[in-house]
Amino acid sequence: MSNNSNKRRLYRDAKEETRKQVKIETPDTETPSDLEISLPKKRFYRQRAHSNPFSDHALNYPINSDSMDWKQLYPQNYPNYQVEIADIGCGYGGLMIQLGPEFPNSLILGMEIRQQVTQYVEDRILALRQMNKDKDYKYGNIQVLRGNSMKFLPNFFKRGQLSKMFFCFPDPHFKQRKHKARIITNTLLSEYAYILKEGGVIYTITDVEDLHLWMVKHLDSHPLFERLSKEWEQQDKCVEIMYNSTEEGKKVERNNGSKWIACYKRLPNPDDTE
Amino acid sequence: MKHPFQLLTSDKSGKYLFTSNQNVIQVFNFGDGNVIGEWKDETESGQLKTVKNDEKKGKAKFSQSISNYIRYLILDDSENYLIACADSDKSILIFKLDLNASNCLNLIKRQQIPKRPSSLAVQDSIVVVADKFGDVYSIPIDSEISDMDKLEPILGHVSMLLDVELVKSKNEKPFIITCDRDEHIRISNFPKSYVIKGYLMNHKNFVSKLFVPHFDSSLLISGGGDDYICLWNWYNENLMQKIDIRELVEEYLDDFHLPPERIRKEQEEEEGKLIKETSIAQISSVTIGEKSYVIILIEHTPVLLFFEFVNNNLKYFQILKFEDNIVNFAVTGDEIIVSLDSETLVKALKFDIEFKIDENEIVSRIIDQISINTDSNFQQLYPISSLRKRKENEF
Ligand SMILES: C[S@@+](CC[C@H](N)C(=O)[O-])C[C@H]1O[C@@H](n2cnc3c(N)ncnc32)[C@H](O)[C@@H]1O
């Protein structure tokens, strides 16, 4: 093992310890004051840029959505503990951190397939909670889970549970042969439609024009989605947040890249379906 | 030595037995044991050989990937068509049955699909085919052959699909049920299959078989890599019963059922022992008088498990042992025909208080007429256990 990767490992191990201690904390015991909670450093969580959504990762997921214990993930008391907003492929979590205070009464979940990236986000949220524990807003409504969204969303979410789903700067998978690996496809959209409630919204943003056209083509042709207008985009808070807050989006900004947006509303099911 | 039938199926009345043996389909009149139809897939499977060379070293490979077997034999509701699947060119074969002709099998359509098919279903003259890439295509029996590149999937999972069923609810609304290697069973509307109705989730391993019994089409029995099978009311999405099968077959498991060599050491360290694994190879049912029985076959075992359906529950009824492993079976009216991986090849069962082996002449005639002689690998008769997921290396 190289010196650097060793350093990264040690750093993450220490964070892992903190994570464990914070997790078993009950509301009436104080976090030990010598426990250092600081915002995690991204460079210690380096990982390969891509993860294959088809492979059999050793993932943890509930056998069905009824078996999911959301109380474990969100510390404060929320009515029903129903996640309503999902950030699919949340990367380093920037979107949720902006959305959290904007929707303090909704639970927000980021799902990310890469283990170390997920750990980074988890540590980031823990640190934010700790740093804001005396404030009105404490980041209690945002959380991240490691998972493969292309396979296991129905293990977490029930029919019509979500009101918003974000797909920010998804991996482009350029090669023709790999198009099924894209996170928006005709067949996956049916699954997203299933967990979105009627009137719910799919948000997409990308800096790859080709991918934008692909997503638009598939969403346009799906009978359960309808594109929202430019005017709608302009007045929607989330579009603005999505445009500015994600790490990938900031990178695009720095490189003077373009950003393409497309948002779609979930239409009602046809009358002759159940 | 003769090669055992890899597939058996029958019409509702049990008059005919449809079989596949490597690349040959044979149809028998079950009244006299005579062959009334035969068809051989002459397509060269040469193109498939390249698959092997392309395969990256060390990657797990599915043993059934190279062959020209006929897989999946089903009859449409009218019993006018036999639908099968040819490995050689990944195509769906649709035969019109003409029982008065000298050869009852008349191939009317051969539709290639892009990826390897993994299961078929048919209802109201529409065939649906699920593939190993996770997609389902719809192929109307009477339509023209479509250009393969123009076929659009009607639904898809990001997983390997292992079975598909077309069903109707009590009020005659059609639905399509699909199951995959990632434990999911999905119910979608049909033909508007972009509207998912729901999921049946209680499996912890791949789901290889779905079965909707003819005696109550609101029920679904599912099984795969778990120690249990599930009985559902699929329409209400309600799990009615989980039935342990491991205990029943434990004594019939052998080295075949051990995990692959490469993970044994790890498992022994973690679990303290090696755990034999069961895979469901077939689920079916038979009705005798007023009573209905569900029949379960675990891959690479010499036994059939019988459960009686009483008060909306499956109650263990009987286990019947043969002298060798069972490859497949078919229910022909109130009899059961079993294909065996041995010199015996075929046995029939009759019900008399319980299910019993019935030595009968027709079976001997059928065996005499098996045309495939082989000493080649029989491994392909047992493809299901290789579907089990193994942890992949973390990165
Ligand atoms: C280019 S990044 C964008 C991250 C973030 N949304 C942003 O805008 O900064 C795409 C992310 O999606 C994740 N991802 C890809 N496929 C996924 C899947 N099937 N399930 C969950 N996450 C996935 C990748 O690991 C990666 O972190």
Image (cartoon, rainbow, N blue to C red):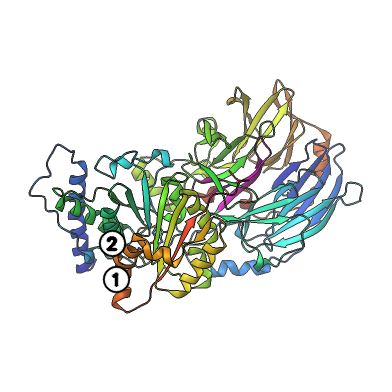
Q: Nearer the viewer, residue B318 or A23?
A: A23
Rendering quadrant holding ligand 1: bottom left
Q: Quadrant of the C terminus of chain B?
A: bottom left
Circle 1 chain: A
Q: Are marks 1 and 2 in contact (CB under 8 Å)?
A: yes
Q: Secondary structure at mark 2?
A: helix
Q: Residue at x 69, y 31 (%)?
A: B215
The location of residue B314, given as percent across then percent down, is 58, 27
At label 1, which amino acid type do we have? Lys
Magenta stretch bounds: B161-187
Q: Earlier in the sequence, mark 1 or mark 2?
A: 2
Which secondary structure dominates the residues rendered in magenta?
A: strand
Residue B187 sits above or below residue B392 on the image: above
Ligand 1 within 8 Å, label 1 CB: yes
Per the rendering, the mark at residue A250 is 1
> For the residue with label 2, is its CB less than 8 Å from the closest atom of ligand 1?
yes
Name the subunit of mark 2: A
Q: Is residue A85 left or right of residue B128?
A: left
Identify the residue position indicated by label 2 in the image. A94
Residue, far top: B353
| Residue under disc 1 on the same chain as residue under disc 2 | yes
Report the amino acid beneath label 2: Gly
